[in-house]
């Protein structure tokens, strides 16, 4: 069983920045890839970014490429999502997930225009 707890969401103006964190329980954090997803009101959940277990490989949705950076600190059982140049369309609930299918409860990000 893995528990994931996201934090760092909030209200920010367009052009602003936020850093999301996802803290994981358990001793096997470093053995699986991690991802961030988001769900806007009335829309399906969508992929945002993912990072390999080692942290050496990352992948991003085209909509966030060059604005978001995913990273991880395996010693802290934590994965991060640094978001800059935020846009109103980035608004949504952001979830982290393991490659093994565990999900967090989400954190709200609201970007005002």
Image: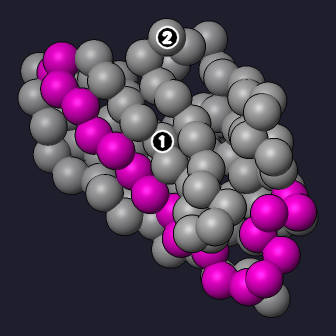
Q: In this orientation, does residue 72 appear? A: yes
Determine whether 45 is above or below 111 in the image.
Answer: below
Determine whether 89 is above or below 75 in the image.
Answer: above
Q: Nearer the viewer, residue 83 or 14?
A: 83
Across and down, in percent, residue 83 comes to: 37, 31
Check disc 2 and report the residue beneath it.
Answer: 66
Residue displayed at 55% across by 13% down = 65
- Where's the N terminus, which quadrant? bottom right
- Farthest residue in the front direction? 75
Q: CA distance from mark 2 to mark 1?
A: 12 Å
Residue displayed at 29% across by 54% down = 9
Q: Which residues are magenta?
A: 14-32
Q: In this orientation, does residue 108 appear? A: no
Q: Is residue 20 magenta?
A: yes
Label 1 sits on a secondary structure element that is strand
Q: Of callouts 2 and 1, which one flags the residue occurring earlier in the amino acid sequence? A: 2
């Amino acid at each position: 069983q893995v528990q994931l707890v996201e934090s760092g969401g909030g209200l920010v103006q367009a052009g602003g920045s936020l850093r999301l964190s996802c803290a994981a329980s358990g001793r096997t954090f470093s053995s699986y890839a991690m991802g961030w997803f988001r769900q806007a009101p009335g829309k399906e959940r969508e992929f945002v970014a993912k990072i390999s277990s080692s942290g050496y490989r990352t992948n991003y949705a085209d909509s966030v490429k060059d604005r978001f950076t995913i990273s991880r600190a395996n010693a802290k059982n934590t994965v991060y999502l640094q978001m800059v140049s935020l846009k109103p369309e980035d608004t949504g609930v952001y979830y982290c997930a393991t490659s093994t299918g565990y999900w967090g409860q989400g954190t709200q990000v609201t970007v005002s225009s």
